[in-house]
Image (cartoon, helix red, strand yellow):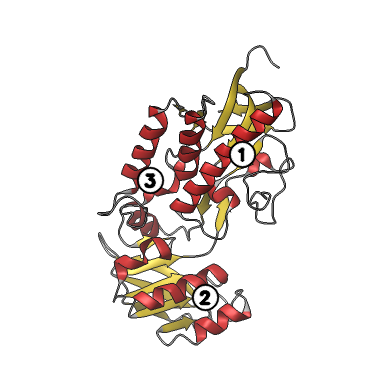
Amino acid sequence: MSTSAQHITCLIIGSGPAGYTAAIYAARADLKPVLYTGLTPGGQLTETTEVDNFPGYPKGVTGPELMEDLKAQAERFGTEVRFGLATKADLTATPKRIWIDETTEITADTVIISTGASAKWLGLPNETRLRMNAGGVSACAVCDGFFFKGQEVAIVGAGDTAAEEATYLAKLCKKVYMIVRKDEMRASKAMQHRVKNTPNIEILWNTVTEDILGAELVEGVVVKNTISNELRTLNVTGFFVAIGHKPNTDIFKGQLNMDELGYIDVVGGSSKTNLPGVFAVGDCADKTYRQAVTAAGSGCMGALDAERYLAAEGIH
């Protein structure tokens, strides 16, 4: 072990519901966890204005408030929360070695990875502005669809996630426009049939989004047919982007088993990775649910798995 490296029993990489919940359980188990927040303390939820589906908040809560509550609870039990980004890792070493901001070296007996996944966006200026100002642009229909009940919305995407979210929105909204860039969908045949058999979903084939209208809230979306170049304005109040997520796992590639998209593989029913003492929780290992409450649950699993690993190794 490097004499210059600080040694930690339980290192948690990444904040958000998974990281903070792991910290709460690890701290209560006296593992003295240290959590590095990453560049966005609190993760994706800090960009969400209203959270109405997290248990225990009957009147709802803002994303930043929820994250501050979880952080305070983790710190109450002794978690040390530090701002910093893990930029390099050697998880095959004993103990594990992680570098923060390319300079600070940490060694750890156990590592809980909760680095999350980042939604992919179209990159339109008004998309970014309205998303950051909670103006009706979202990457999660399950999270935000309720706010558009009885209204008309648009969703971009052609895969299984887009199809599933379109049918979910169709149950709440008066009309759903599904914007598909090509003349076919990537979604499974079953999901395509479900979309096509939902009467209030209109699929716009060979169509791309040109602009999102609205000063403070979404007031419409300008789309273009890529064959005719015809422009059309959709009178919608919500705009959902479902073109995929990218798990924040690049620094672990070549060491941890992952799927083709970069999501970390875990042993079924646990948070265990292919490397002993390394655990993955939250959205970096979950491409199916991606909810705050499921992330929190997996964070609990990560801490319990880490505690049991340390006990079996005689470290704690």
> How far is disc 2 from disc 1 in space, using C-alphas?
42 Å
Label 2 neighbour load within 10 Å: few <14, some 14-19, many 20+: many
Residue at (48% x, 82% y) in the render: 203
Residue at 55 percent across and 61 percent down: it is 244
267 vs 223, left or right, is right
Q: Secondary structure at mark 2?
A: loop
Residue 298 in view, yes or no: yes
Which mark is drawn over residue 204?
Answer: none
Picture coordinates of residue 253, whole percent (x, y)? 70, 43
In the displayed structure, 238 sits above or below 282; it is below
Marked residue nearer the N-terminal end (3 or 2): 3
Q: Residues within 10 Å of mark 3 (few under 14, many from 20)?
A: some
Amino acid type, mark 1: Asp
Q: Which residue is mark 2?
A: 180
The answer to which image quadrant residue 137 occupies is: bottom left
Q: Amino acid at mark 3?
A: Thr
Tell us which disc is closer to us: 3 or 1: 1
Badge 2 amino acid: Val
Mark 3 vs mark 2, foreground winner is: 3
Q: Is residue 104 left or right of residue 203?
A: right
175 to 211, vertically: above or below: below
Front position in the image: 239 or 19: 19
Please say whether residue 232 is visible from this viewpoint. Answer: no
Residue located beneath label 3 in the image: 46
What number is the disc on residue 305?
Answer: 1
